[in-house]
Amino acid sequence: MTQAPQTGAAEWASNHSSEAPRSELIKRLADELLVATESLVPVPPLRDRVLNMTVEDSYQIQDAQLQHHLAKGRVLAGRKVGLTSLAMQKQLGVDSPDFGYFFADMVHHEDAQIPADSFISPKVEPEFGFILKETLTGPGVTREQAAAAIGEVYAAIEIIDSRVEDWNIKLVDTVADNASCGAIAVGTTPLDVRIEDLAEVECSLIIDGEKVATGKGSAVMNDPVAPLAWLANVLGEQGVSLEAGQLILPGSFTGAMPVVKNSTATADFGELGSLKINFS
């Protein structure tokens, strides 16, 4: 297995001198995470090896990886908003959301057999999946405009994974690491629910037949549509739109739960339906 590149704290501190352009540091960190994604060999926390690392630095590292993948021909399928629930913010010790991306080859469906060894240390989160029927371009997107842009709502599960050792992450680490996105599973039959009722929908996360967590849509920033508007506006400031047809995951109902080989995970929306996936 290829060893991911690792650099000592002293060298990274030196690289933050005026002799090393910021863009060079961004590229080196992005390359390190790209190698870790392929090798499944995690890297030490970025925050410990870069002086004064900012969230803006992290998003540049994330975007450098996105551009690399797009240049290789991968197809962007959608975006995810993370850290929208109090449970997840407490779990990771942060107080603000983040976002990432996923490609068409990362999207699975009902009863998928997903190789557990394609991840480092996977966890699952139950979510809504929004298919956009209209393009959203911020800044200035309102909650009402975001709601009107949602075409269908599906049951979804995000598989999160960290290319940072032992899930030892703070906000700058997870943002740089594509918001810890590993893969996405989404149902094939829309949930029969009104957009205005999403906050009251209850979902349980079931692992190997055992209910391990339950939450309501209101756990997602008090309103699952709010992260969609937030994302459209943040990306809009960068000149990026959320395109019609894209899949958007607004955030988890519950804290993330680990899975291993031969596990099953189900997002159970009660009478609205469910989504089950398998880790082979």
Image (spheres, rainbow, N blue to C red):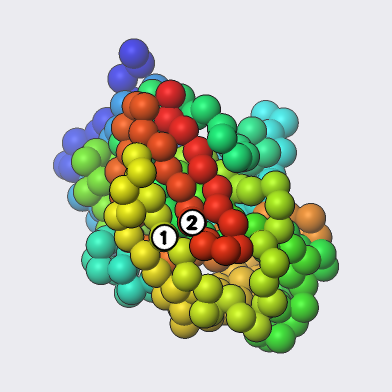
As drawn, 178 above or below 242: above
Residue 109 image position (x, y, % from top left): 62, 39
- Picture quadrant where residue 125 is located: bottom left
Q: In the picture provided, is 65 more to the left or to the right than 196?
A: left
Q: Residues within 10 Å of mark 2 (few under 14, many from 20)?
A: many
As drawn, 149 above or below 153: below
Residue 204, disc: 1
Asked whether residue 206 appears in the rendered view, the answer is yes
Q: Which residue is mark 2?
A: 268
Front-most of residues 85 and 198: 198
Dot 1 falls on a residue whose secondary structure is: strand
Residue appearing at x 25%, y 62% in the figure: 91
Which quadrant of the figure contains the N terminus?
top left
Q: Residues within 10 Å of mark 1 (few under 14, many from 20)?
A: many
Among the two numbered marks 1 and 2 on one chain, the one whose residue lies closer to the N terminus: 1
Q: In the picture provided, is 81 more to the left or to the right than 246?
A: left
Amino acid type assigned to the residue bearing label 1 in the image: Ser
Residue 173 image position (x, y, % from top left): 33, 52
Residue 249, disc: none
Instruction: Tell me whether circle 1 and circle 2 mark residues in contact (CB < 8 Å).
Output: yes
